[in-house]
Amino acid sequence: MELARILPDKALPAQRTEVDFMEAVVQQLVKDFQWDLERVKSAEMSMFSLVSGEIEWGMDHDPSGTFAAFYRLDLGEDLVRRLLHDHERPKAIDLLAEKCLQRSALKVWTRWTFSA
């Protein structure tokens, strides 16, 4: 996962590194999905796999928690509904995971770019 792939039209603010950015994105995802940071750090899988697995599990076991995470990530309800309606479930989950990664990265980038 790198900035150029997640947010291709953005550049890191001055004095910020790609490593710092990726750590901040992980922390943002931990906050928005209400995960345990130590468990995330010890997981031996990509963030995309973690997020898509969380969405898949949440759709079956805790839809309200999953939709709350989408809300915290500022994914619009219309976007979520459209993706779930227009695509088969596995594809919709992958697209939602990608949107979650993009949105968390954008939240970090915006905070870093416009903070005083």
Image (cartoon, helix red, strand yellow):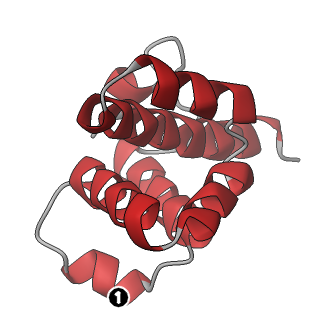
Q: Which residue is mark 1?
A: 38
The amino acid on which the numbered mark 1 sits, given as a three-letter code, is: Glu
Q: Position of residue 25 (x, y in %)?
A: 49, 53
Q: Determine the image quadrant of residue 93.
A: top left
Determine the secondary structure under disc 1: helix
**Residue 57 location (% of width, % of height):** 34, 66
Q: Quadrant of residue 107?
A: top right
Dot 1, how many residues are within 10 Å of its Cα: few (below 14), some (14-19), or many (20+)? few
| Residue found at the far right of this picture | 116
Seen in the picture, residue 48 relative to 106 is either above or below; the reply is below
Q: Is residue 64 above or below residue 38?
A: above
State whether residue 13 appears in this view: no
**Count of labels shown?**
1
Residue found at x 57% / y 22%: 82
Query: Which quadrant would the N terminus be assigned to in this image?
Result: top left
Residue displayed at 51% across by 72% down: 62
How far from the left and from the top, in percent, is residue 49?
Answer: 22, 53
Asked if 53 appears above or below 75 in the picture, the reply is: below
Residue sitting at 62 percent across and 60 percent down? Answer: 69
Relative to 63, 3 lies left or right:
left
Q: Tell me if residue 72 can be seen.
A: yes
- 87 vs 110, nearest the viewer: 87
The reply, left or right, for residue 6 in relation to residue 89 is right
Q: Residue at x 54, y 19 (%)?
A: 10
Q: Is residue 71 left or right of residue 27?
A: right
